[in-house]
Image (cartoon, rainbow, N blue to C red):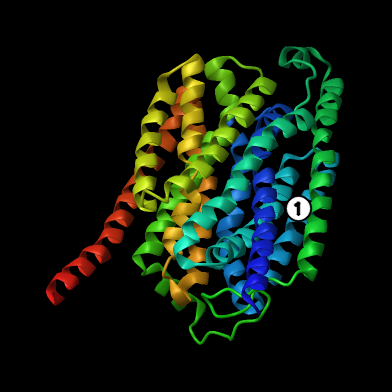
Amino acid sequence: MNEPTSRQSYAFAFVMITSLFFMWGFVHNLDPILIPHLRRSFSLSVLQSALVDSAVFIAYFLMALPAGLLIRKAGYKRTMISGLALFAIGALLFIPAADTQRYAFFLGALFIIACGLTVLETAANPYIALLGRPDRAIQRLNLAQSFNGLAATLAPIVGARLILVDGASDAQLQAMPETIRQATLAAEAASVKGPYLAVALVIAVIAGIFYFLKLPEVGAAGAGAGARQAPSATPVGEALARAWRQPAIRRAAIAQFFYVGAQVCVFSFFILYASHAAGLSQIAAADYLGWGCGLAFVTGRFAGTFLMKYIASARLLFIYAVICTALSGVAMFAGGAASLAAVIGIAFFMSIMFPTIFALGIRDAGPDTEMGSSLIVMSIVGGAVLPLLFGYISDATHNLQFGYAAPLFCFVVIAWAARAAEQEQRAPAANTSTGALKHV
């Protein structure tokens, strides 16, 4: 293959994989709309509504390892198509869930979607990191993840107008006869069917495109995107243990657990938070979530990608984590516009964290790339655990703002991991300088 053709192939593959980042970002960021919607429909507490996130992120823990094994056996392309198929099936299941009016069925549909997203993310993140020059991997992954951030801007704005129903107030609902109240809530719950049917159809089209698409080979595992890799002689348990023994992978898995937990707390509870701290309506809060947090998130991704040309990625991660820690403290105690500004600021500064942590973890992982990727994706289960802590603190203190103690702690852990990665980055440079002096 000549060089111009190779560049075109890589560019087109990058565009197609990046479309996946947008799609799973869009669906993930419908969850903050679902939480107040289902909380109203089923009269849930904050802790019970957090089960939406638990259903999603438990799937990451359960499916990440099978996804890594699937990459080894079937290649990146077939793995991504499998993830798209699960994604579409889960979206379609929202139709019977709405018809049956069972909260557990909604959680089940979200779980199936998340299984598909786990498979997609386990394959797409390392594939993007490996698709080109190794020294540009972190910037490349941040750029692709920027479109995930774009979805975070659009999904709440679009989703609020399609899913959140401006119907009877809570007081009016309580005054209704039970049969009429149940019928009203059932009609409101049905508003999810149209948006998720549209998502399923779009994903089915993308899966069809990927089926016929020839993806270029990537260099880490030495296998083509669609090719089967040679069976490994190393047992799975031993391969996982070997990957875990790598300090960078272990540190990234821990940091990712707390990062995803923090992100889910910030985004999923924003509408409830804005209503409590600033007195906004749900539609107005959803607009702030999109145009405020979402736009700050995507802007932060592009800005962070640019700044990494001048500031080492681990150093920038540390600075941003410290800022997010301080802003979480403000979010706990401020009110009105200041509370909203603090949370929007968190969205900006946490924007680079997921791709940067991921890329730092698998950099120079060699044969441990697939298992390392699985471990880091498994750690996304933090998104199932930390929101429960957020909900528990909020319910126990009767103050939703105090729930921000959970993301505050998460950002402290991320700052620790970033500092350790920064010191590790400096060590080779110091050793190289010492060696150079010895040879003079």
Label 1 CA crowd tier, 10 Å (few <14, some 14–19, many 20+)? many
Count the marks: how many? 1
Up/down of 382 relative to 438, above or below = above
The image quadrant that residue 182 belongs to is: top right
Residue 202 at what x, y percent from top left?
81, 51
Residue 188 at what x, y percent from top left?
81, 28
Q: Is residue 252 left or right of residue 41?
A: left
Which residue lies at the image location 51% right of the left edge and 87% below the top edge? 233
Q: If the image is split into quadrants, where does the C terminus sit?
A: bottom left
Residue 228 at what x, y percent from top left?
65, 81
Residue 399 showing in the rendered view: no
Which residue lies at the image location 73% right of the left edge and 43% below the top edge? 106
**Amino acid type of disc 1?**
Gly
Which residue lies at the image location 45% right of the left edge and 31% below the top edge? 404
Residue 127 at what x, y percent from top left?
58, 66
Residue 285 showing in the rendered view: yes
Up/down of 296 relative to 384, above or below = above
Q: Is residue 86 left or right of residue 307?
A: right
376 or 171, which is in the foreground? Answer: 376
Which residue lies at the image location 67% right of the left edge and 66% below the top edge? 8
Q: Secondary structure at mark 1?
A: helix
The image quadrant that residue 131 belongs to is: bottom right
The residue that label 1 is drawn on is 90
The image quadrant that residue 120 belongs to is: bottom right
Up/down of 349 relative to 9, above or below = above
Q: If the image is split into quadrants, where does the N terminus sit?
A: bottom right
